[in-house]
Image (cartoon, rainbow, N blue to C red):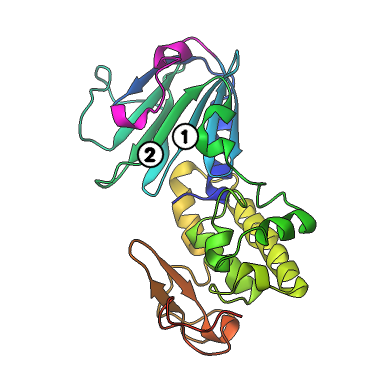
Amino acid sequence: MPELPEVEALAGYLRERAVGRRVDRVEVAAISALKTYEPAPAAASGRTVTDARRHGKFLAVVFDDDLHLVVHLARAGWLHYREAFPSGGPLRPGKGPIALRVRLDDGSGFDLTEAGTQKKLAAYLVTDPAAVPGVAKLGPDALAADLDTFAGRLRSRRGQVKGVLTDQTVLAGVGNAYSDEILHAARLSPFALSDRLTDEQVAALHEATGRVLGDAVSRSLGQKAAELKGEKRSGLTVHARTGLPCPICGDTVREVSFADSSLQYCPTCQTGGKPLADRRLSRLVR
């Protein structure tokens, strides 16, 4: 799933390429992806792209007269910028990967696509981003929160720190991959209880959050949309590296699997050398 650094980079890419261009038309190929009906997609036609922004893990394309196309890319969604589109008529609703297409006046534009069968990409055309339920519920941005705000939000929920860190109502922008990276950098077990962390542990987690996300944003900015996934993978130390050596200590990166996701961690760096066999049975929480 695209997280804060990738969405920030996509917004930056759109600011560089699309701002100042007039919208020719917006075409919806996956009716289920468009979650609003008023204003209609035709309302964007003729308007100028004035900005692109990030709200947590939501991407927002801003048109003049306060019209916003707000998108949550979900697990398998992505943005593909086209310098030119293939010849042919408008998109037809169907089973292909394209959910929505924005054509600009110079012949370029972008597609919002989603792979797989679980179609969860969501697009909203609104006059205020706060009208999008997920945006309205966002906590402070993870990259912008100072230590006091970060500590207060983290301790406002009792739970395993991995889950609290990825709760978008607590802190916005962190998902499965970067939470693994942040916890590894902070040398914390993913099962540590958020309301039992010491001041030193919270400070280490805050520092690691800023450093990991900041480094990822720095690497991603300036990259083309098509290059961002590869850039993300190249910068990971534990996430999606099960069985490989930890680049810090050399121990083997291990995994805990859940019904529809998994986490990766280094026992030496994070759990005193002891593997986490099962999230329900493990006592390695501090």
Does 46 lie within the magenta span? yes
| Residues at circles 2 and 1 in contact by the CB criterion of under 8 Å | yes
What secondary structure predominates along the stretch shown in magenta? loop
Residue 110, label in figure: none
> Which residue is at 43% across, 41% downward?
73
Query: In the depicted view, which residue is nearer to us: 7 or 20?
Result: 7
Q: Which residues are magenta?
A: 30-47
Residue 71, label in figure: 1
Q: Is residue 142 above or below residue 265?
A: above
Residue identifier under label 2: 121
Look at the image and tell me in which quarter the C terminus lies.
bottom right
Asked if residue 144 lies left or right of residue 184, the reply is right
Say if residue 22 shows up in the picture.
yes
Q: Amino acid at mark 1?
A: Val
Q: Looking at the image, is mark 2 or mark 1 earlier in the sequence?
A: 1
At which x and y percent is residue 270?
Answer: 58, 80
At which x and y percent is residue 93?
Answer: 23, 25
Residue lying farthest top? 46
